[in-house]
Image (cartoon, grey):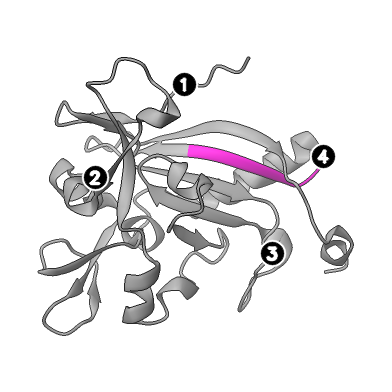
Amino acid sequence: VIIQEIVGQTYSNNRFYPSFSGVLKSINYYPISYMKRTEGVAYLALGFGRTIVDGEKCLRISPKYPSILPQFFSMKSTQENSQNHFYALPLKNQNVSDEDLKLYSLKVSEEDGSLKWLGSVISNEDNNMRDSLLIKGTRVVSFAPILKWETIPFSGIAQEILKIGKKALGCPVEIEFAVNLLDNGKHEFCLLQIKPMVLTGLQKINQK
């Protein structure tokens, strides 16, 4: 039996969820540009990590090159590939289980104040993406405050955790985590689970 703490914070006395969740993997099977397979990959999503586990829209980055975002190569691509809803736990439910998680729109996240840590806007005026929620337009989960302005030093943390995990287990790893971003600046990075990564094409990877 595995007992795992649920990481998150309460919003509007109605919902509970982390600012964002993620999965780190030691092997990046789809490197582009300067990336190498062995440098790893991160999958990031607003709210609970069910978005990632279920294969829904989330942000995929290289921890070493966080500014390279192939999903956002154009405004059309950005709108089509960015996360447009998130999972949270309604607090009216007393029994906690995966089935209790509910989908919410990004509008709810903005009202809760959680989108400000992760969001940008595709402006209605010029169709360009701005890293501010004060502009009218389509909301996008871009992670710009994290990846551009380093609200938390995510890139460094991710690379270090992957290094430690691989050394501890003696093989490539997969790590689940959740982050609470707080107004007082005392942000929380929580490790949830680590396990050996299931590999395919191992021989080719070792040759890189």
Estimate how packed mark 1 is, as few (under 14), some (14 to 19) or many (20 or more) residues with alpha carbons within 10 Å.
few
**Real-space Cα separation, disc 3 to disc 1, in angstroms:** 30 Å
Task: Check if residue 156 falls in the magenta segment.
Answer: no
Q: Amino acid at mark 1?
A: Glu
Report the side of 140 relative to 167 (left or right).
Answer: left
Of mark 4 and mark 3, the one earlier in the sequence is 3
Report the side of 166 relative to 139 (left or right).
Answer: right
Residue 62 versus residue 199 in the image, above or below: below
Residue 140: x %, y % from top left: 28, 63
Name the residue carrying label 2.
114
**Real-space Cα separation, disc 2 to disc 1, in angstroms:** 21 Å
Name the residue carrying label 4.
170
Name the residue carrying label 3.
29
**Real-space Cα separation, disc 2 to disc 3, in angstroms:** 31 Å
Residue 15: x %, y % from top left: 23, 31
Residue 154: x %, y % from top left: 47, 50
Name the residue carrying label 1.
5
Residue at 55% across, 39% down:
176
Residue at 73% across, 45% down:
197
Q: Which residues are magenta?
A: 170-177
Residue 74: x %, y % from top left: 37, 82
Quarter assignment of residue 79? bottom left
Q: Depth-wise, is mark 4 or mark 3 nearer the camera?
A: 3
Question: Where, quadrant-wise, is the C terminus in this rendering?
Answer: bottom right
Estimate how packed mark 2 is, as few (under 14), some (14 to 19) or many (20 or more) residues with alpha carbons within 10 Å.
many
Of mark 2 and mark 1, the one earlier in the sequence is 1
